[in-house]
Image (cartoon, rainbow, N blue to C red):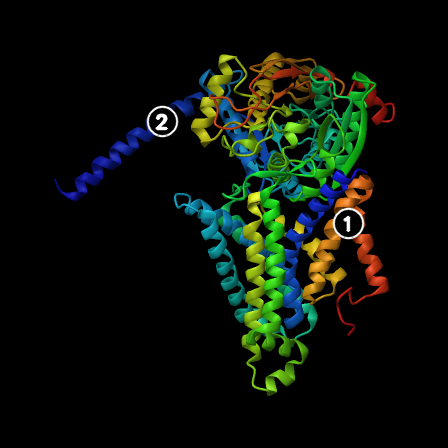
Amino acid sequence: MTFEAAAGQALSGISVGMVLFLIAVGLSIIFGTLKVLNLAHGSIYMVGGFLCFGFTSALAQVPGAFWWTLILAPVVVALLGGVIEILLLRRIYSQDVLYQYILTFGLILMLGETCKFIWGVGYHTVSAPWPVNGKIPIWGLSFPVYNLFLIGCGIAVFLGLLALMRYTGLGRMIRAVTFNREMANALGINVPRVYTGVFMLGCWLAGLAGTLMPPMSVVALGSDMAVIIECFIIVVIGGLGSLPGAFLGAIILGLLTAFGIYIIPKLAVAFAFLLMIVVLVIRPWGLMGKPE
Amino acid sequence: MRPVSIFVVITTILIVVTIGIVAPLQAQEKKPVVVGFIHSMSGAMSMYGISSQAGGQIAVEEINAAGGILGRPLKMITRDDKLNPETGLREAKDLLLSEKADFLSGTISSAVALAISNHVKREKKIFIVNISQSSSITEENWHRYIFRIDTNAVPYWGYANALALGRTWKDKKIISLGFDYEMGKNAIRQFKEKYLQIVPEAKIIDEIWAPLNTTDFTAHISKIANSGADAFFLSCIYGGGELAFTKQAYAFGLYDKMHAIQPCAGDVETWHGVKKGEPYPKGALATCRYPFWAIKDPRNQAFVEKHQKKVGFYPSYGAMNQYVIMYALKAAIEKVGAVDTEKIVDALENMTLDTFVGKVPIRAYDHQAMMPTWFGIIDFTPNLPFPHIPKAEVVGEESYHTVEQIKKLRGGK
């Protein structure tokens, strides 16, 4: 293995990991506060992808259409999330955990069929926007600028969320509710409103990931199921509900996938699951999580 | 004029017109030859169903305009299988029972095709597959009443690509990337089997697998780029996966670095939405099941125009197959002189179809029509708005399993 090849593979791995982090972080945040494992998180991400296609086509004549879309689409997805939380999720917090799975599984079907109804069953693509559409040579590999941009987005989102949680009043409230719901309630925090806010934040993040993906990939039905399993692996490795855990888990998964493919390509598919099993055996609460 | 008399006048005109239309039909009083057509008419694969139906309907209109079959009109009745074997089987039964269908045809899902195939085996009715690719339909699960006028997975994913590479670049070091499931594993096995016969010194240096429906191939692509291979082969990566892969490989400059072999990237279905300037499989060797732009026969031009007019998009290979199927049935019925299933099976077994894509023999042993597969280098030309293979070369019977190979698969029978 030459240095160039290894470095190129590492960079690819980080790119894969950061894309998955952008999707998984919302799932982790929602679980951390609401204790709801949102099976439909992948579908919400997919809605973001379809909205990216929808907005960029509608704004085709506007200069910088993609950048406007990047502002608009995640907000629309967050509003959708708000509606879902207020109308549906709110009713099942006190119920058995099984109802969460049934409800969020039902959402997968509903959101998938809605996308099919509006955008049809074909594949859609969105071109990489200026100025992140070229490629630059790094270690003998010509690397697409858009992948570097995605890595930057992942790091920015991670730091932004850390700052939000640590330094803002909203972050303090979220941490208080996460730490002890009853106590927070007794201290006068409007817990249902925090729940709605956190769910919307999680959906905004999924929408952001969904909007960022189409320029390097495709918008297609079924992309929800393709990513949700990897997201679960990330949050299991990192620790459910832990923000640094999701970041670490995503980087580990990305590098593991990349070097798995590099060294033993025939078995690369299995490595992520093997790592998950090892983590579950040694540290069931995840690398950065806290034991219950 | 009072309103009542207007009503009377209109009614009279309508009655006269209706009699005018109905009378000649009644005078004919010939029972139509009925083909039951079962396909995916709704959902993810409906484009193929709609296109194939249009192809069949064009043949029906042409045949009826020319006097039908043995003086009888030809009729095609369409049913939706919803990609579900049970629905498909139910529709097949209903077509045979209540519509008195003489023949069945269609299907894109191999599971649906196998369900219907089992039924017609008992009912002793002919079923002609128009898209379903599983080679087992005509190999392991073959019976007297099943026919396929279409390619199958052996040439499509494997042999035709091996032959194409053997006739062009003859690359020695090949790396493969496939979806991690049965079709993907079969495709690389078949490709290897055939390619090593043609270029014995060649080597598959690595096989990379990605989970089904992967859309981020970044790490796979950097591995391929640094593998030192002369060419990469996509093993059953199609549809959205192929679009995503191509976009990323294009961004990585992979197509400038090594040869690419992308089975089915020559088919219009995946690429018709890609415009010049967007990522495409630049310079890739691709196979194609119906390069309608490259076929010179004037019947082909007429067919493409009729299909466009009917449904508003380019014809898929399913449309071409269904058109050929309808004419094959006509030829067989006319040769026998009656709609007699047993005799028509015998007639089809020894028939060479004269189609606008060339002479296509139906092999008696496995009832598989030796439909050609084309190959060429993907490029843009001023003639079409999407990437395609401008110069299409053809492979035929050599791209299918031989009779000996199938005998082995059937356990010597």
| Horizontal and vertical percent position of residue B206 | 80, 33
Of circles 2 and 1, the one toward us is 1
| Horizontal and vertical percent position of residue B1 | 12, 40
Q: Quadrant of the C terminus of chain B?
A: top right
**Between A153 and A173, the one nearer to me in the picture:** A153
Element at label 2: helix
| Vertical side of A181 occupied by A47: above or below | above
Q: Tag 1: Cα neighbours inside 10 Å, few (<14), some, or many (≥20)?
A: many
| Residue at the image point whose x is 47% and y is 30% from the top | B313
| Vertical side of A34 occupied by B407: above or below | above
- Alpha carbons under labels 2 and 1: distance apart: 72 Å
Name the subunit of mark 2: B
* Count of labels in the image: 2
Question: For the residue marked with disc 2, what is the amino acid?
Answer: Ile
Label 1: which residue? A256
- Residue B411, picture quadrant: top right
Label 2: which residue? B21
| Horizontal and vertical percent position of residue B220 | 72, 40
Is residue B328 visible in the rendered image? The answer is: yes
